[in-house]
Every structure is written in C-alpha cells, then in structure tokens.
Amino acid sequence: MKVEHLMEFLAKTAKLEKLRTQCMIIGIFEKRQLSPSAQLLDEQSKGYITQILAKSFFTGKLGQVMMLYQVPGLPCDSILLMGCGTQDSSAMQFKELSRKMSLALKENQIKEAICALTELPFSEISLESKIRHLVETCLDTFYQIDIFKSKKNLVPSLQKMTLLLETRREQRAADRAIEEASCIGKAVTYVKDLSNTPANICTPTYLANQAEKLVKRFPKLSCAVLHEKEIKALKMGALLAVAQGSIHPPTFITVEYRGNKDKNKPQKPIVLIGKGITFDTGGNSIKPAANMIGMKYDMCGGASVLGVLQAIAELELPLHVIGLIPCAENMPGGTAIRPDDIITTLSGKTVEILNTDAEGRLILCDALTYAERFNPSVVIDIATLTGACLVALGRHASGLLSNNETLAQALLQAGVESLDKCWQLPLWEEYHEALQSNIADIANIGTGGDAGAILGACYLAQFAEKFHWAHLDVAGTACRFTGKDRAATGRPVPLLVQYLLKQCN
C-alpha cells in the first residue's frame, strides 16, 4: 500500500501585499476586527475589505468563511476571510478554524494558497502548535476514500500552501513543525487506507504483507512475521483460540525501529502493541447483524502501530521502538471456541471463556507476555477493545488505564498537545474481583455487565505485571462505524507520535 502525499507545505517571511497566489487566507476577529494581515490588505485595497464586511453577515464568529474575488489593488486571485472568534480562543478552537478553512479550500477547489492564520495571537498556542494543527487538519480534510472505487475521485485540489512567518527567527521551528505534521499526516493517511480495507482483502496474512512492505521503505525498520506453525510452537494459546474458527490463519507481526544513534548505549525499547482483529463477528457469542457493520475496523489498533512506526522512521527519531501486532479473524462455527471453554495463554495462565466476543483481550494478553522478552522501558497497547468505552467517553477521548502514573500522565499530556485526547479511568483492585473464575485462573469478562472498559483493562493488567504498561481503548476514536460517514480516523497516531517526540528530549 503506497501512500501518496501530493500537498506541499512551506513557511516563509514575505510582504503579504505583494504576493501572487490563487488564494490569500486572513483572519477576522469578532465584531469585524481585522487581524494584522487583514489590516494590511485592507489598506492596500483602499478599504475594500472593511466595506464588504460592513454590508455582510460576516461578523468574525469562529468558523465563519467568506470568499472575496478580484479584490482591487491586490495581486492575489481571491481572499478567504476566516472568522477567528476572540483572541483568547483555545487550541481546540484553532483546530476547528483550521478545519473550516480546509473545507472552504476544498469546496472552492483551490490549488495554491498563502495562509496568514499563523499570526493570530491566540492565548497559550505556540507557533509550532498552530502550524502542526493547520497542516495535519488540512491533510485530514482532503483525505478521500477511493481505494476500491472503479472511478477514482479527482486528485485533491490543494497542491501547495505557504504559511507566513512574522520573523526569520521563526524559520527553523516552523520547518520542524511542518516536517512533524507532514509525517504524522501521512501516517494517519496510511492508517486510514489500511483500516478502511474490507476484511475479504485485509486478512491476517494481508496485514503481515503490508508490514513487510512498509519496512522496505525505511532502512531502520525490520520485520518478522510468525505464522500459525510458529505461533503453535510458542504456545500462544489465546491467539490460536480466537483464530481457530476462521479459514484465515493467524499471524503475529513484529516491526522494530532502531533509531538510537549510540550503539554502545543500547536503549530499553518502547513496545507498542496493536489489536489486529481483521473482522469480528463476535464468534459463537455472535453479534446482532446491525452491530457487525464496521467490524472491519477492529484492527485499527494494529494499523495505528504501523502508522506510528512509519512516522518515527520518517522523522528519524533517536529511539528504539518495537511494534507487536497479533492478528486473527473472529468467526463462529464448529471449530470456533465456545463459552465455557478453557484455554491456556502464553504466560501459562488459564482463562475461562465466558464470551467469545471478548476476543481482543485474548490476543493482546499473549502479545503482552511476548513483550517481556524485550525488557521494555514501557509497553502501550492500542485496541478497539470495548463498546463500553464508547458509551463512557463518546468519540472525543480515548480511554486510558495504566499501572504507572508517570506513563499515564505523559500520555495525557501528549493527548492535550496533539489534540488527540485521552481520559484516564481507574484500575483499582476492587474491579479485578469481577474477573475471578472458580474453574480457571481468570475469566475473560466480568460478571454483572458493569464497567466493561475498566474490566477489559483489568484483564490485560494481569499479563502486564512485569513492566510499566498503559492501555488505550480507542473503540470510540479510531473509527466512525455507523452512518454514511463510516470511516477510520487514524487516531491515536497523533497522540502516540507526540508522546514519542517528547521521549527524545
């Protein structure tokens, strides 16, 4: 799968009023207050912008847009006025402003634009953050799902965007922000393409092939794939149990990135584990038909691990990161596991299966045990694990549970900085009691049906006792799996890349 990146972003200082471009983007605050660039262009056009605003509905409310054409005295073809709200707007509001800007450029089929929104004096938002949000949001908005259409959509109309800087001293930071945002945006696109691929194509073997193709593009990446024979030899009983009802055999993917420059000082790796259920029927605890739509997205956690590795390899971060992706298809039938079955995991612990639709935690527990061999500094798993997390947090925040508060706080902060937020839920001992089994070491679901997202993490915590570990439940954030806008989002790639960027400091 090749990810095309057709948009060019650059930053520079220049005299705005003399620049030739198809579209100039400037900000207007509430009560029609002009931003510095808007004032400059208004003066150059002898008050034309002020006159238009006085006669229009446009007040500068956050997200309002107005396109002006053939403005007198200016060399640009058009000016896009963006309502910026107040100067104390938040980072999230700036991202919404970026989204409305991108939609306007897309609707008007703008190919080239110069953006002066980086000058907006929003409180507590750095220049680098504004650039990151602008670039990432633009790439996200122009994403098109046309992989499997017989007639492809038109190439995204925007080809080049120049972000204006106020001083040359900002150039280095701006260039780095563009590089980071572009790599994150490309990784998100890669994850979307992979996640949107239907399960009749995206099988466990297909995911393994995609991982092998990915590593060929980056010399610091390597890949190893365990197939069914090797998985059996390792005695990954939980992964095998989930896969045994499907005609598609399981795979276990390891992708390693070695970016640490000093080979004499080896780093303990950061291990990322992604759930790779390529389709989830619920198994013999079968889902209702309506709930099965969108279950191709049950491998979004695994896809996000590959996306993160692509981004950090392209950024050449000085880190040692290992991605583990257990892959299986969860199907019903005569060979599939049943409620009341007991399986033995890679750790040696036995599990009583009370619900075959709680399969993600089964494949992840074997991956958590496998991670021990790398002596990791931290382990983070990413999974569309529970519908309960979607009920609890909706689609704005991923669920976060951890056995280490320092790691949890670092992920929470990365979520705030990337605007790919997560919210911490408790992992108290009291919850673990619900997973007790009188016939095996542990049950795969809790009794009573309460606190499903927490109990899913409690199950995983039983296999993460030997290292610092965090669990991201992305059931509500990795995809929108209902309605006409059904699609993958690429989350939590921005959160995880931001976390890893911070580890380089």
Image (cartoon, rainbow, N blue to C red):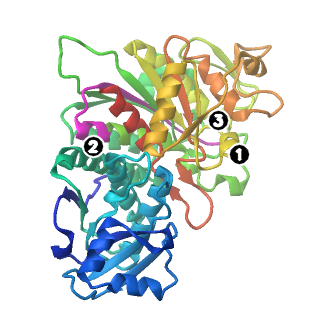
Please identify, in this view, whether the residue under mark 2 or under mark 3 is nearer the observer: 2
Labels 2 and 1: the sequence-earlier one: 2
Where does label 1 land, which residue? 391
Q: Residue at x 26, y 71 (%)?
A: 113
Say if mark 2 contacts mark 1, CB within 8 Å. Answer: no
**Magenta residues?**
310-332
Q: Which of the two discs, 2 and 3, labels the residue nearer the N terminus?
A: 2
| Residue 95 in view (yes/no) | yes
Please give the name of the residue rendered at 71% of the width and 26% of the height, measured from the top-left corner: 353
Q: Nearer the viewer, mark 3 or mark 1?
A: 1
x%, y% of residue 394? Answer: 65, 48
Return the residue at label 3. Answer: 336
Whether residue 328 is in magenta: the answer is yes
**Which residue corresponds to mark 2?**
213
Crowding at label 1, few (<14), some or many (≥20) Cα neighbours within 10 Å?
few
Q: Report the Cα–Cα distance between label 2 and label 3.
A: 31 Å
Task: From the image, state whether disc 2 or disc 1 is nearer to you.
Answer: 1
